[in-house]
Image (cartoon, rainbow, N blue to C red):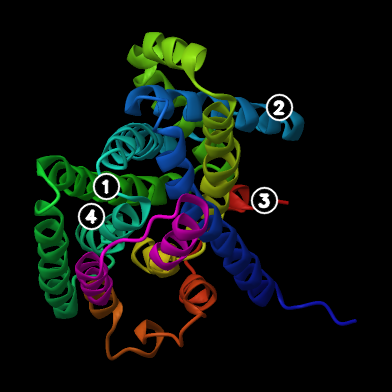
Amino acid sequence: MKSLPADRRSTLLAATAASVTVLLWASAFVSIRSAGEAYTPGALALGRLLSGALVLGLICLVRREGLPGRGAWPGIVVSGLLWFGLYMVVLNWGEQKVDAGTAALVVNIGPLIMALLAGWLLKEGLPSRLLAGMAVSFVGAAVVGLSMSGEGGASVLGVLLCLLAAVAYAGGVVAQKPALRHGSALQVTTYGCVIGAVACLPFAGQLVSDARDAPLSATLNMLYLGVFPTALAFTTWAFALARTTAGRMGATTYAVPALVVLMSWIALDEVPGWITLTGGLVCLAGVAVSRSGPRAEAAPTPSGTAPATGVGAAPEPRSERSELS
């Protein structure tokens, strides 16, 4: 059987990696909601990061991965603080105030913020459609906020925390992108996770206290978050990110909210209200507008193919160290 060309093989590997990431990150919203009943936000973030860092560290030892290049460290530090640290704490907090589906709908404006930051900082371009998409998503976020206002101030706070999580997520991805030119996906993910864990060490006392009283199911959810949505999914994300632009990679997460709503309905018997869902869909529409354009490689993809097409489009040069064998 004839082997695939190198560029086609790279595209398929990146698409597979992105698909794994989307599925595991969707499951994370449900696990956070479940574990959050027994663990405080900071304790849950620290437990997740410690278990993730342990698994990643063991993989690095087995693979004999050394330290990433000096040029990778600024991006690793920033992404570790923003994405692995701040994002996880505020998302955990937000999900104690709103259901998993609502959290996913709000956080998924992250790709729009990511495209804005990438266009400005990474010189990926700032098309006029990006500004239009921002306006549409802002309206959607406002609708979500208003729909939650009838359920009390705590729900509004939850929406605001999820918005903050989206900003932290976007900033972390944009910071991570240049780091992948100087280190492998595994290296960048591992040390970003370690830095996030160090930043969350002030929650160590609370983690010990919560773990003592938490039911086994909550602790298993926390460990699951560390091993799969963190150690595995963040590595597959970095692997795919090394092969496309930050703005385009963000588009692969379009499917996350739908998967979260389905999973939370099955596992938690939670479904956002119709007004909240409408506002969330408007948010996603704004992201779609921001990623559309007249160029062929920026055209919207058919339903169900966004991860594969988005990741495969316009791959950038990358170092050989970013390959996962």
Position of residue 252 relative to residue 224, above or below, is below
Is 30 displayed left or right of 320 in the figure? left
- Quick one: SS at disc 2? helix
Which of labels 4 and 3 is toward the front?
3
Chain-order first, disc 4 or disc 3: 4
Query: Secondary structure under badge 1?
Result: loop
Residue topped by disc 4: 121
Magenta span: helix, strand or loop, mainly?
Answer: helix
Q: Position of residue 307 (x, y in %)?
A: 50, 71
- Compared with 211, 152 (above or below) is below
Where does the magenta region start and end? 257-285
Q: Nearer the viewer, mark 4 or mark 1?
A: 1
Name the mark on residue 98: 1
Q: Going from the N terminus, do you reach mark 4 or mark 1 first?
A: 1
Q: Residue at x 21, y 74 (%)?
A: 282
Q: Amino acid at mark 2?
A: Leu
State the SS at label 3. loop
Q: Are the two marked residues, 4 and 1, in contact with CB atoms closer than 8 angstroms?
A: no
| Magenta highlight on residue 279 | yes
User: Is tag 3's residue or tag 2's residue first in the polypeptide sequence?
Assistant: 2
The total number of labels drawn is 4
At 39% from the left edge and 33% from the top edge, which residue is drawn?
36
Q: Measure how far apart labels 3 and 1 are at the Cα level.
A: 37 Å
Residue 187 in view: yes
Residue type for callout 4:
Leu
Determine whether 137 is above or below 23 in the image. Answer: below
Dot placed on the residue nearer the N-terminal end, 1 or 2: 2
**Residue at 50% in and 63% down:** 317
The residues bearing labels 3 and 2 have C-alpha atoms spaced at a distance of 15 Å
The label shown at residue 324 is 3
Q: Earlier in the sequence, mark 3 or mark 1?
A: 1
